[in-house]
Image (cartoon, helix red, strand yellow):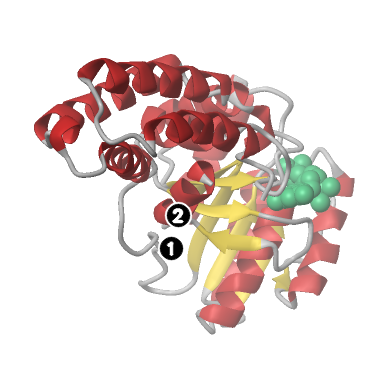
């Protein structure tokens, strides 16, 4: 809940000035928008996103005749709220996972090391099993880090999901093949493939992820990004999306006290839906993304 405190404080300062005033001049609206712009930039929202956002709110404010409205301040606040919801992907039900089709369906998890990818893989397994009543098999493809494989094995137990036994010496693509085969033979509906995390995006990582995707034909390829890393997370999302056909984003550590801008920018920069938010270290700490709720949280 701390995630958006800074942004919330800044915006409520602007809104305090707007409310409790009978009449607003165009100048007042402009001044408010200038402050909103600063608040968003300080919250780590990327400049092009901020520019777009402010222009849209201004356009609507003029079109809606905010200045002559009964409570113009409230009107501006509503426009900002609606603008944030739009920016975050619009109203309506949060987009779920594409799990229909001939089982087993593969979900590919991608992301930098430390982003929360392995934890999120287990959280997703748990969620799909409890909510969708589907059987999930978790497989670790992180051949370079045995510790990462063991971590997923432990988390699979907590999630009460299946886990593909570790076989030393196999390549990531060999494991992917084995996972899909095991999923099929053992009656799993969903196979979640946890790809290797790296400290930076490199050609080898991308080539490997592509080869895995060719084998598993995933219905979902989810990029896991740490919300606390702000603009770095946005850049990571942009670069992954250039090379791998992602279907959605998961933002972790939304329970931390980052500045929240990453959530706003990532959606805008990649055009991809944010599907889930990580909200704790625990295996049930995964929320479906809801644009209205997040916008409400930002505005306090
Ligand atoms: P990976 O290297 O990307 O697989 O990252 P891990 O899944 O190992 O996560 C790294 C650390 O972040 C672990 O200590 C996790 O418990 C923690 N973590 C992951 N997601 C969240 C989250 O949403 N909130 C919090 N507070 N911690 C998280």
Query: Around disc 1, counting alpha carbons within 10 Å, would you say few (fewer than 14), some (14 to 19), or many (20 or more)?
Result: few
Identify the residue at horizontal 44%, vertical 19% (top origin). 35
Q: Position of residue 4 (x, y in %)?
A: 60, 39
Q: Position of residue 3 (x, y in %)?
A: 65, 42
Does residue 199 sit above or below 192 in this rendering?
above
Residue 29: name its quadrant.
top left
Q: Residue beneath label 2, please?
A: 220
**Is the residue at mark 2 in contact range of ligand 1, meaning its CB lies under 8 Å from it?**
no
Which is closer to the viewer, label 1 or label 2? 1
Does residue 250 sit above or below 132 in this rendering?
above
Residue 192: name its quadrant.
bottom right
Q: Position of residue 57 (x, y in %)?
A: 26, 30
Q: At numbered mark 2, what does the secondary structure look like: helix, strand or loop?
A: strand
Does residue 76 sit above or below 93 in this rendering?
above
Q: Is residue 266 visible?
A: no
Q: Is residue 78 visible?
A: yes
Query: Around disc 2, counting alpha carbons within 10 Å, would you say few (fewer than 14), some (14 to 19), or many (20 or more)?
Result: many
Count of numbered tags:
2
Identify the residue at horizontal 49%, vertical 32% (top origin). 11
Q: Residue beneath label 1, please?
A: 97
The residue nearer to you, when weighing 288 against 21, is 21
Q: Position of residue 247 (x, y in %)?
A: 41, 47
Q: At numbered mark 1, what does the secondary structure look like: helix, strand or loop?
A: loop
**Is the residue at mark 1 in contact range of ligand 1, meaning its CB lies under 8 Å from it?**
no
Identify the residue at horizontal 63%, vertical 61% (top origin). 286
The residue nearer to you, when weighing 32 against 225, is 32
Dot 1 or dot 2: first in sequence order is 1
């Amino acid at each position: 809940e701390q995630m958006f405190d800074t942004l919330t404080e800044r915006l409520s300062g602007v809104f305090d000035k707007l409310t409790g005033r009978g009449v607003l001049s165009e100048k007042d609206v402009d001044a408010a928008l200038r402050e909103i712009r600063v608040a968003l930039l300080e919250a780590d929202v990327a400049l092009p996103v901020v520019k777009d956002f402010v222009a849209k709110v201004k356009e609507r404010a003029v079109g809606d005749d905010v200045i002559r409205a009964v409570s113009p301040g409230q009107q501006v606040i509503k426009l900002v709220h609606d603008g944030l919801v739009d920016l975050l992907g619009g109203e309506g039900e949060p987009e779920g996972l594409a799990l229909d089709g001939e089982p087993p369906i593969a979900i590919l998890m991608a992301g930098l090391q430390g982003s929360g990818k392995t934890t999120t893989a287990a959280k997703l397994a748990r969620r799909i099993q409890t909510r969708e009543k589907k059987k999930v098999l978790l497989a670790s493809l992180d051949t370079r880090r045995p510790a990462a494989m063991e971590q997923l094995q432990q988390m699979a137990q907590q999630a009460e999901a299946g886990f593909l036994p570790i076989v030393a010496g196999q390549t990531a693509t060999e494991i992917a093949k084995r996972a899909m085969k095991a999923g099929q033979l053992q009656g799993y509906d969903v196979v979640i493939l946890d790809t290797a995390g790296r400290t930076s995006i490199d050609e080898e990582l991308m080539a490997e992820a592509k080869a895995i995707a060719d084998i598993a034909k995933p219905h979902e390829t989810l990029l896991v990004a740490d919300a606390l890393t702000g603009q770095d997370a946005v850049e990571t999302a942009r670069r992954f999306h250039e090379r791998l056909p992602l279907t959605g984003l998961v933002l972790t550590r939304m329970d931390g006290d980052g500045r929240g801008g990453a959530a706003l920018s990532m959606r805008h920069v990649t055009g991809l839906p944010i599907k889930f938010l990580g909200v704790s270290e625990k295996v049930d700490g995964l929320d479906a993304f809801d644009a209205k709720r997040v916008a409400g949280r930002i505005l306090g």
